Image (cartoon, rainbow, N blue to C red):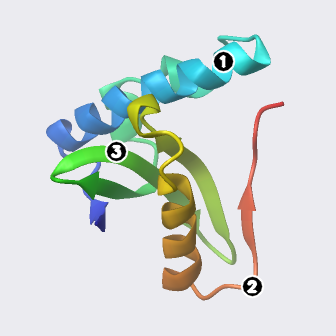
Amino acid sequence: MIKIIDISNRKNAEDVLNIQIPSYKVEAEIIGSYEIPPLKDTVYTLQHCGETFFAYYENEELCGAISIKVEDVVDIHRLIVHPNHFRKGIAQLLLNFIETKFQVETIKVATGS
């Protein structure tokens, strides 16, 4: 199930951070750099990032999340899945959800390389 979550709620921010750190550690290993900004996030920085968060739950467990900012376009800031839930199609479900929910012509995202 995918639903919007209130990131200003401390428990929600903690839950997101608890999947974000392991997820981005895997990316850091792949690209050979631990200087990825999301690895430096805290509950406070998540709560004040100005992004809207949607979370994917499986049996009430937070497994993945996507965060966006919407202006003229949808700008994806984070797409995270806990490593225990890799290869289950969760990231694709989150992307499909955003595409369906926000009927805009352009969706943009930046990635590390």
Residue drawn at (33%, 38%), measured in percent from left and top? 16
Residue drawn at (65%, 61%), measured in percent from left and top? 75
Residue farthest front in this picture: 87
> Relative to 15, does residue 94 appear above or below in the rendering?
below
User: Of callouts 3 and 1, which one flags the residue occurring earlier in the amino acid sequence?
Assistant: 1
Report whether residue 67 is seen. yes
Q: Which amino acid does label 2 sit on?
A: Glu
* Numbered disc in front, either 2 or 3: 3
Front position in the image: 85 or 50: 85
Residue 6, by quadrant, is bottom left
> Crowding at label 1, few (<14), some or many (≥20) Cα neighbours within 10 Å?
some
Residue bearing the label numbered 1: 28
Report, in whole angstroms, how far the alpha carbon at label 2 lies from the one at label 3. 28 Å
Q: Which amino acid does label 1 sit on?
A: Ala
Residue drawn at (50%, 39%), measured in percent from left and top? 86
CB within 8 Å, label 2 to label 3: no
| Image quadrant where one finds the N terminus | bottom left
Residue bearing the label numbered 2: 105
CB within 8 Å, label 2 to label 1: no
Residue bearing the label numbered 3: 63
User: Of callouts 2 and 1, which one flags the residue occurring earlier in the amino acid sequence?
Assistant: 1
Residue farthest right in this picture: 113
Report, in whole angstroms, how far the alpha carbon at label 2 lies from the one at label 1. 31 Å
Report, in whole angstroms, how far the alpha carbon at label 3 lies from the one at label 1. 19 Å
